[in-house]
Image (cartoon, grey):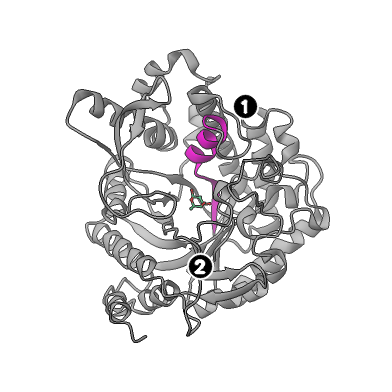
Amino acid sequence: MSNAKAAALIARAKGLHLPKDFVFGGATAAYQIEGGWNAEGKGESIWDRFCRRPGAVIDGSSGDVACDHFHLWAQDIALMQALNLDAYRFSIAWSRVQPQGSGALNPKGIGFYDRLIDGLLAAGLAPHVTLYHWDLPQALQDKGGWYNRDTAHRLADYAGHMAQAFGDRIGHWTTLNEPWTFCWSGHASGEDAPGLTDGAKGGLAASHHALLAHGLAVPRIRAAAPKAQVGIVLDLNVAEPASPSPQDQTAARHFDLAQNRFYLDAVFKGHYPAELLDLCADILPDIRDGDLATIAQPLDYLGVNIYRRSVMAAGTEWPPLNFGRVSPTGDYTAVGYEIFPRCIHDVLIYVHENYGPKAIYIAENGMATAIETPDAQGTILDLQRAAYYVDHIAEMERARRKGVPVKGYFAWTLMDNFEWAYGYTVPFGIVQVDYATQARRIKFSGETYREIIKARR
Ligand code: FCB
């Protein structure tokens, strides 16, 4: 690499020196990469349905084909090996293995994950599985989806089936990915499937049932896979007031209550934050006796997805919370997230000091750019993304050295893919996907990440 900036980044990557047993991986999610949306008996999911709604996805696209990982999984495993990854975080498409979300399982769908898991193990990669990364079977949505308490029981049954099928081979089981986002973006703002616009009331109702699903699923996984490590992945942001004014401080606190503490307090302390319950007293969901005890299952790890900090001022989202995001001067990614490497250090300290999980994985961290094209040498010199990884991993390491038990880091994402409502317009990968040919190409950020991995002591 002749470019001086590139050489300087590689030198910094080589200087990071994480411990030998620190786990580095790549992360993906089923709907974003698999394609094969109706192949071999797969049922429809809420994302299959949502993408067909005009205007729902910015470029009118869908995950129907995506990266065709359903067919190209073996070459994708080879790619992970080429990147020197230790682990691969992926999700199971519920409607592929249980098309209606309840009742009969689909042996062909289970067969797909069987082959994937065996392929990963044969390649020396540790599978970290997520059971629910946003693709609820449409048949369950037709019965009310996350507003229906029964969905929690259906997810627990599905978790039990998966643990029976794969429990002998998977060490790390995540129940849910980002309940804050799929509940609020799916039920308050409607940006994500199922596209409901019910404000805070919708976000809270979906969230309570999602957390209940998590709590019911954990013992089902442990029963079938007693040696498994079980956790949940939350998207957390340290909230900062935009100014010292009491209004902005209140807004930042409300945001913290809604995005962070609602989930963390429930999972780690067995209660919802009293201030949030008071504030939202008129719109609370049906929280029954014993629910919080069910939710607060002992966990082996917490997965944290971190993309930014959140600077908050008084605003209009979501009454009665009334916060609004402020964008400080700085660099931003193609999805409008401020690039602020310290966010990863700060979120780790926040979680460690307030909740003390036994182990933490950074389950997602990465950045979107505009669509990239290779240069004359065939290289994608994504210097900004490479710098993002070096800077964020260095900030994570700063927190680890202060005693935060962070055990692993997963780059979002292994390869460019379907970025939900942004469609294919904002690549996030360390590997490029040419959707016309399905060719994969490791970007400069992927090479930088490989150097960070190789530099462990
Ligand atoms: C997270 C999601 C993941 C991906 C990244 C960019 O919220 O978990 O699927 O879309 O954002």
Residue marked by disc 1: 147
Q: In which image quadrant can residue 249 be found?
A: top left
* Front in this rendered view, residue 309 or 436: 436
Left or right: residue 449 compared with residue 229? left
Q: Is residue 66 above or below residue 124?
A: above
Left or right: residue 238 compared with residue 129? left
**Can residue 439 be seen by looking at this rendering?**
yes
Residue 175 falls inside the magenta stretch: yes
Q: Whole-percent x and y of residue 168?
A: 64, 62
Residue 448 falls inside the magenta stretch: no
Q: Residues within 10 Å of mark 2 (few under 14, many from 20)?
A: many
Q: Residue at x 40, y 62 (%)?
A: 408
Hey, what amino acid is under mark 2? Ala
The boundaries of the magenta stretch are 172-189
Specify the label residue 285 is tagged with.
none
Q: Whole-percent x and y of residue 334?
A: 43, 54
Q: Residue at x 32, y 64 (%)?
A: 393
Q: In which image quadrant can residue 10 be found?
A: bottom left
Quadrant for the N terminus, please.
Answer: bottom left
What distance separates the C-alpha of mark 2 from that of mark 1?
A: 34 Å
Residue marked by disc 2: 87
Considering every residue shown, the one lying at the far top of the view is 282
Q: Is residue 285 above or below residue 345?
A: above
Q: Whole-percent x and y of residue 226?
A: 58, 53
Hey, what amino acid is under mark 1? Tyr
Label 2 beta carbon within 8 A of ligand 1: no
